[in-house]
Image (cartoon, grey):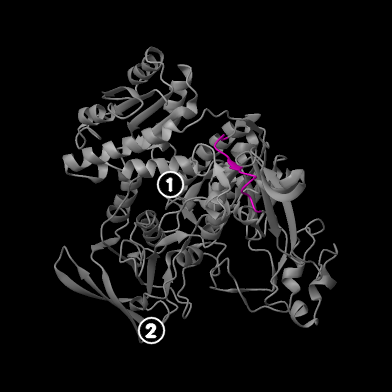
Amino acid sequence: MQRVGVFVCWCGSNIAATVDVEKVAEVLGQEPGVVFSTHYQYMCSQSGQELIQNAIREHSLTGVVVCSCSPRMHENTFRKTCEKAGLNPYMVEIANIREQCSWIHKNKEEATQKAVILGRAAIAKVHLNAPLTAGTSPVKKRALVIGGGIAGIQTALDIADAGFEVDIVEKEPTIGGKMTQIDKTFPTLDCAACILTPKMVDAAQNEKIKIYSYSEVQSVKGFVGNFRVTIKKKARYVDETKCTGCGLCTEKCPQKKVPNAFNLGLDQRRAIYIPFAQAVPKIATIDADYCTMLKTGKCGVCSKVCTAGAIDYKQTDRFIEEEYGAIVVATGFNPIKLDQYDEFAYSQSPDVVTSLEFERLMNAAGPTGGTLLRPSDGTHPKTIVFVQCVGSRCDDSKGKSYCSKICCMYTAKHAMLCREKYPDTDVYVFYIDVRTPGKNFDEFYRRAVEEYGVHYVKGMVGKVVPENGKLKVQASDLLGNRQLHIDADMVVLAAAIEPDKSARPLATMLTASMDTNDFFTEAHPKLRPVESPTAGIFLSGACQGPKDIPETVAQASAAAAKVIGLLAKDSLICNPCTAAPDELMCNGCSSCEKVCPYGAITYIDKEFRGPNRTTLVRRVAQVNPAVCQGCGACTVACPSGAMDLKGFSNKQIMAEVDAICR
């Protein structure tokens, strides 16, 4: 029987306001094996930790139960505290009476009763705990950044500047992401390309950075410090080592009618293309869906005009395997599709565009050379209506319930640029409310209204109807208490943004957590904002939630700092709570091997002494403790019950259940 000490935390009023902590300490002090029980206002404080250490020494405690907040918050704190007092850190159990009890109950009597039950379960488990010793595993001093937008580039540059090798995997033919499609940035109206392209060039020229463009992550195995990643490098049908980026092939290709994805389909390109002038790497790519040579075997013009001999029609996808110590997710965002918003006539009129399409129309490198023209007839628009929150802050069945955060500011930017470049244009902005939570953001919005004369109207647009070359806009003015009818030449929709479609399958590969909107979830929203709950996986940029460029860059550098801290270590302490098979019960079925996400389980033939001293050879499971991460998947899958988990054995779990049910 263990000598258990119980320590109940008030957590200020977080727990004590709903739970009678004195009663909990008193009742748990009467449990078998408990030799000491007390309560304290802040158990995680230095005084609280000293209280635990003194109790361990004075009462010769062999096990400790702390009734406090989530183990994710302070389990490591209390383990280190007990270790300093001479107790094995894995003889500590946390009963979560804050998140699982006080925060979800209003009735103090019910909450107190539940806190006692959770404490009993922890005491029952600690009685069956055994001292564990953590091993170590080496750290591969190389990082992987998934996504080559501004977040991925900044993260990679910071990691490389610290002296570590880093690879960028980008699914598009060039790095740069959405920022390459933007004309100006708010609130300073800097040229986006002028800011971004030096970063892109720096990444390409940095000897510590390797760029895998036109590539995707195919699989991820392993664990923190030792990830094994398979990268699929898609066939460009152009030899990257030979292509000089001269662009001659893109000029001579006879297939001219390919929708230009970089300009969001607003113009056309050739079947072989370089996305934009400052592309990095500046290498041509053949679009296999439109290339006549690849589809019919007839053409080959690009091969004939290429003086470098870089065209390779027989090129196939390649798979590259690399090892990394840390992985950074920087998969970015996309505007939502507007198929469900036909009330704005997006599918009916080419003059109804999204804000990102409007960016391309205003961009000097865009389809119109920077001159704002109506897509329908190429004339200059005299009246433009901007519609805010299209798909944001609405019913989940139709759009996104969250605020997309950047729309208010980029709409103000668009309105200002229109009025500055074309003073004869009337600009209307319809909004629910204006959100400008950033440095100099509110001043920027006020300039649009006061200095540039943009008409901001509080109200929503109900319908847009194309009629006789005009867009009939029906809207409400809530402050003026009236209905408005505007004959517009263009309507610009501020579409909600959502995570890139690659985020969900990638999260499955990384065993990383996501929220209901498919944004990656951080380990803790305040204390660990750039870390995933999965060790070794870090978050950068809009993959975690809507962000503007300054916030994205700041988070990218924060993620890089965390990666550098990890890669600076020669080894990491392993989790001793690993799986262990009972060889006498194992029937060699391979069920556990199939479900292990880390590849920690193998099978060996082992000799056993049978009846009458005969020798039997049986196939049994074997676990590599250096690879096992203690996820417990194998213990659930094992049909014979042979697989168990140290620190969370079947007996311990059942003891907790019995304590709860008694």
Q: What residue do we see at 32% from left, 32% from top?
A: 67
The span picked out in magenta is 575-587
Is 581 one of the magenta-colored residues? yes
Quarter residue 426 falls in? bottom left
Residue closest to the far front = 612
- Is residue 395 rendered magenta in the image? no
Magenta stretch, overall SS: loop
Q: Is residue 27 left or right of residue 67?
A: left
Q: Name the residue under label 2.
A: 469
Could one spot residue 646 in this view of the protein? Answer: yes
Q: Quadrant of the N terminus?
A: top left
**Is the Cβ of the residue at disc 1 closer than 8 Å to that at disc 2?**
no
Residue at the bottom extreme, as displayed: 468
Q: Is mark 2 on a helix, strand or loop?
A: loop
| In this rendering, position of residue 553 left or right of residue 235 | left
- The three-letter amino acid code for the residue at tag 1 is Thr
- Give neighbour class at mark 2: few <14, some 14-19, many 20+ (Cα, 10 Å): few
Instruction: Please say if 289 is above or below 70.
Output: below
Q: Where is residue 322 in the image (x, y as percent from the top left)?
A: 71, 47
Q: Which quarter of the figure is the C terminus placed in?
A: top left
The residue beneath circle 1 is: 188
The quadrant where residue 161 appears: top right
Q: Which of 395 and 621 is in front in this view?
A: 621
Which residue ends up furthest to the top in the rendered image?
58
Alpha-carbon distance for marks 1 and 2? Answer: 36 Å
Please give the name of the residue rendered at 47% of the width and 32% of the height, measured from the top-left corner.
129
